[in-house]
Amino acid sequence: MPKVIFERDGRIGRVTLNRPEAMNAIDDELPGLLEAAIKAAEADPGVHVIVLSGNGPAFCAGYDLKYYAEGNGNGQATQDMPWDPMKDYAFMWANTQKFMSIFRCLKPVIAKVHGYAVAGGSDIALCADMIVMGEEARIGYMPTRVWGCPTTAMWVYRLGPEKAKRMLFTGDKITGREAAAMGLVLEAVPEADLDARVEALAARMATVPVNQLVMQKMVVNQAVEALGLNETQRLATILDGITRHSPEGLNFKARAEAVGWKRAVDERDRGTWDWTANRPINPEA
């Protein structure tokens, strides 16, 4: 089965992440396939609005850490030392630009988030023009605790500096209900109502001429870009590479290889491991 699917349903283009067995986790191929699907929907003259969603139990669970962190991948995420930061930057910048095809697409994109949109999955969702979440779905960027910096950097543009710092300094996952109250997403609805709410919103937008939708999106996006979005993303992408090759980042990678990524991630997210000393924070507890 294709990892990303594009279908047209009347005036609505449907782009679906389709790695349900891996909670739509990001591998080497998915960013390019996502970009291609978005561009196909953009180029289809019959499409007025795009709904971006995930097949299976989650929208997107981020980068596939079993592939990248346990040492089963191709070594792109963390290079052997000596590290070439520009090789790392080129790889991650390409992914960032592929995710940003959602933001730059001339037509509106609604992200429908169920389950999880976390880590790199939140990078994807936050590039959409608006997000509707299930009330109990989770969004967050846990790798800000160690081994990551969100390369699309959309948190500050959606939340402002203080609330963005609240999310990035903790790496917390929050519910759709909390995300809506914070202003991170458009709204949160009960999971049973998520499909119907997104369909109603997309159908309403689809009654507007394409050229009108394009012009309104261009105006709003120009305001965001004028705030320095491209420069912020360049810095974030460079720093993302540094986080994975800092002493703490290399300790996380080694820990994931030794005990498996699930345990390493649990230690990261619960805050029980000192990544600088590379030992439990409270070894006697």
Image: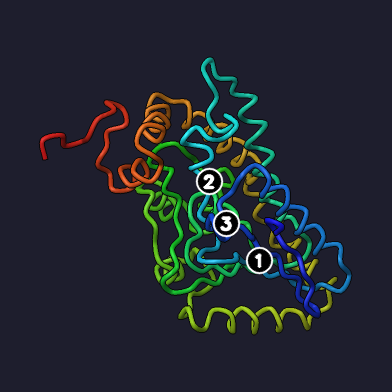
Graded by Cα atoms within 10 Å as few (under 14), some (14 to 19) or many (20 or more), the crowding at tag 2 reads many
Graded by Cα atoms within 10 Å as few (under 14), some (14 to 19) or many (20 or more), the crowding at tag 3 reads many
The figure's colour scheme reads rainbow
Looking at the image, is mark 2 or mark 1 earlier in the sequence?
1
Looking at the image, is mark 2 or mark 3 earlier in the sequence?
3
Graded by Cα atoms within 10 Å as few (under 14), some (14 to 19) or many (20 or more), the crowding at tag 1 reads many
What residue is pinned by disc 2? Answer: 64
Q: CA gap, disc 1 to disc 3?
A: 13 Å
| Viewer-closest of 285 and 240 | 285
Q: Report the side of 143 relative to 263 (left or right).
A: right
Q: Report the side of 237 relative to 283 (left or right).
A: right
Secondary structure under the numbered disc 1 in the rendered image: strand
Look at 65% across and 25% down and name the residue there.
Answer: 87
At label 3, the amino acid type is Asn
At label 2, the amino acid type is Asp
What residue is pinned by disc 3? Answer: 24
Secondary structure under the numbered disc 2 in the rendered image: loop
